[in-house]
Amino acid sequence: MKNSLGNRLWKIITSPSRMMLTVGAVIIMISLVRQYTGISDITSPGAAGATIRFTIPILMAGLGGLWAERSGVINIGLEGMMILGTWFGAWFGFLYGPWVGIFAGAIGGALAGILHAILTVRIGIDQAVSGLAINLLGMGTARFLSGVFFIGKGGDVNISPQVEGIGTFTVPGLSPFLTDIGSKHILVISDVAGVCAGFITKINWASLVLILALPLTAWILWKTRFGLRMRFCGENPVAAESLGVNVYRTRYIALAVSGALAGLGGAYISVISTGNYLEGQTAGRGYIGLAAVIFGNWTPAGVLAGSVLFGLTDALRVRQSTSVHALLLVVITLALAYGVSKFRKKDWKGFIIGLVIGGVVLAYYLINKVVPDEFVTFFPNLTTILVLAFLSQRLRPPAMAGAPYRKGEESS
Amino acid sequence: MKRVNRFFWALAAPLAAVLFTLIFVSIILLMKGANPLSTFQLIASYGSQPENLVAELNQTVAYYLAGVAAAIGFRMLLFNIGIDGQYRLAIFIAAVVGGATNLPAFLEVPLIIITGVVVGALWASIAGYLKVKRNISEVISNIMLNTIASGLIIYMLQPGRFGLKGGLSDNLATPTIPKSGWLPSLHIMGGELYSFAFVAIAVGVLYWVVLNKSVFGFNLRATGMSFRAARASGVNAPRMVFITMALSGAIAGLTGMGELLSHTHTYSLAFPTGYALTGLALALLGRSNPIGIAIAAFFWAFLEQAAPALDLNGVPKEIVMMMQGTIILATVTSYEIVKRITRRQQQRLVGAAEAPRVDADAKGVKS
């Protein structure tokens, strides 16, 4: 029992041991906030469903970033790969149906991933340059192809024809039951029920399939021989090579998968979320995926946590902007709790930081009625900067991610 | 002989890149059913019309400054992808300050320019601080800072904060800068050339002189070449990294200033984005050399000016964007390949000179 596959997977997903505790505390806090402010949308099934839809593209991009960086190559081209995913997804989805579209999105992203691999691994150009150029190429290619293919087929230079949808499923019996409990406004119980109801009501089949990428990634990277070698390449390619790992080939595979995952995220946006390709619809989610990787400290569980956090703010912003305002109370509580914990450890600097952040946000909460959309939009980016600034000692990126590596040469 | 050889290889890389791009684009054009030759002819003839030339020169100035900003970072192996946020925040705040004050021209214009420079430097120094104190890649922090800058600008541009609803276009814009803060344009070739071009030239000269002829520039280049060696010889290397980032941001703050001072006199969301990528591409193309960057900037502006003409003739104008992306990749790739070829040549030369002394046992050992 102890070593069953399911048990192992569970361990991987919950690898930071305090995660369950944290999740519990957050649930209670959100529940209290919901009770206090009376904004019941925060934990409604609808909000939970929307969070899933907003989380998946970020999660896919984040997992793509994880694959690339764990193998030692930074992938700033995620955004461009996502854009290709949206285009290929919409076009092939229009021609052959949504599932083919999603698959084609993965292929489109993977092609860009392989290009990134050729340029950075084989030729050895700067990884940031290659990534940024791929973003430019992805944008240009999608625009160019739209002009060539969409006109006359019911689309235009920046919009594709409509793709037919994929069905959803609802767990019978349980879903209405939980929804019912959720609407009774009982502390904690209703909130948990409401969120759970959201997870089993009208869930798109594609969401269910794509989310499998998370346990699969965790399993491949930490439980297989290939995964061990891949992470080895990210930590010390010279040593890996000397022990017989083919660093180039490993990185090629990692980047192809990275691009495919980003492409899947893009295809999800165009095929599932909107039902067609719209220019600029990725809206920087590739970069937010990169942010989720950092936020998640280069672990699958962490990437999931980051994606959910960023997806949640996105979803709440779109549904009801007062929800985000109410959630400031959670931020205030967390900041003050941080300050108090530092106070007990006699860490005065941390105490003051916690107090100041809590105080400023509290003042903002009391003065304003809503959080402006613009602030919510860059919330993931600001969070990443703050995490980097305050927790950088605790972060542990792959040691050689971003460093150039040539076979047979000492890395300089 | 050696000199000619080096010169040849230095030119070979960008030429090969441009050639590769032309071939690549030709293939795409042929697939689309357009004639590549006539398309290139169209770009060339449209771009070299006098009235377009002036517009290109104005665009060149902005691109040039973005390129120099990127090039300063490159000398320190810093990848300032934050130019976009730095430039827009700088121009926005400069426009706000200019719109709120009404000093005599000899004070107003410098005030606006210096505001831009300071804001750009400050915004960039966030990334510089994180890099030096927290060892965080400037690429990641700058990407995040770009989005934050955009959000802040949109927030502050709302009516009732610093923005006004524009008259003709429905764009949100800052209050118009009073006439004393306007910089005249030169009337040439039927167009109006922003006189800010002279500032750009001065920046280019200053960049070259400071980098190549001053102790500061020497320290900067030394730190870029080897952080540890510079540190060992007494240079405060982390401080140099921080200053370089701030300097790069300061120059980024000048990007777009010509348009603000001589043309729009107000900041609106119509100010273009994407200067970071362009600046980096130009610095790469021009090998961080001020004249090289200028040529590359003109080339870039030339291509972009011709884009609308392509659309009118049935060629999708996005081909220009693809051309630019391809040029970046092709340039970097060919520089990398040339670097390897020349290194191998040098190794061979050294090997030939050393060969009589080192014999049999050296054979079979890969150089």
Image (spheres, coloured by chain):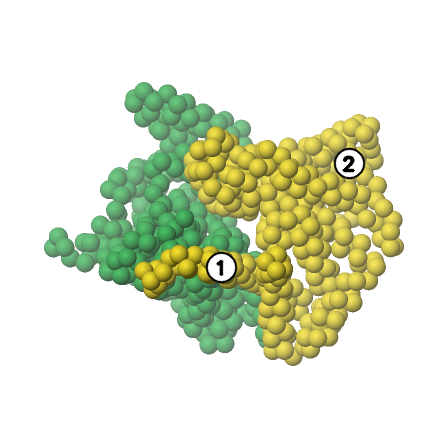
Chain colours: A green, B yellow
The amino acid type of the residue labelled 2 equals Ile
- Which quadrant of the figure has residue A18? top left
Instruction: Compare marks 1 and 2 and give the one earlier in the sequence.
Output: 2
State the quadrant of the C terminus of chain B.
bottom left
Side of A373 where B194 appears, left or right = right
Label 1 sits on a secondary structure element that is helix
Question: Amino acid under label 1?
Answer: Leu
The residue located at (66%, 42%) in the rendering is: B208
Question: Relative to A260, is A190 above or below?
Answer: above
- Of residues A354 and B2, the one drawn nearer to the viewer in this rendering: B2
Figure check: B98 above or below A49: above
Q: Position of residue A343 (x, y in %)?
A: 33, 21
Tell me if residue B362 comes above or below residue B253 in the rendering. Answer: below
From where the camera sits, is residue A78 visible?
A: no
The residue tagged 1 is B349
Q: Secondary structure at mark 2?
A: loop
Q: Position of residue A73 (x, y in %)?
A: 41, 55
> Which-is-in-front pick, marks 1 and 2?
1
Q: Is residue A175 above or below residue A32?
A: below
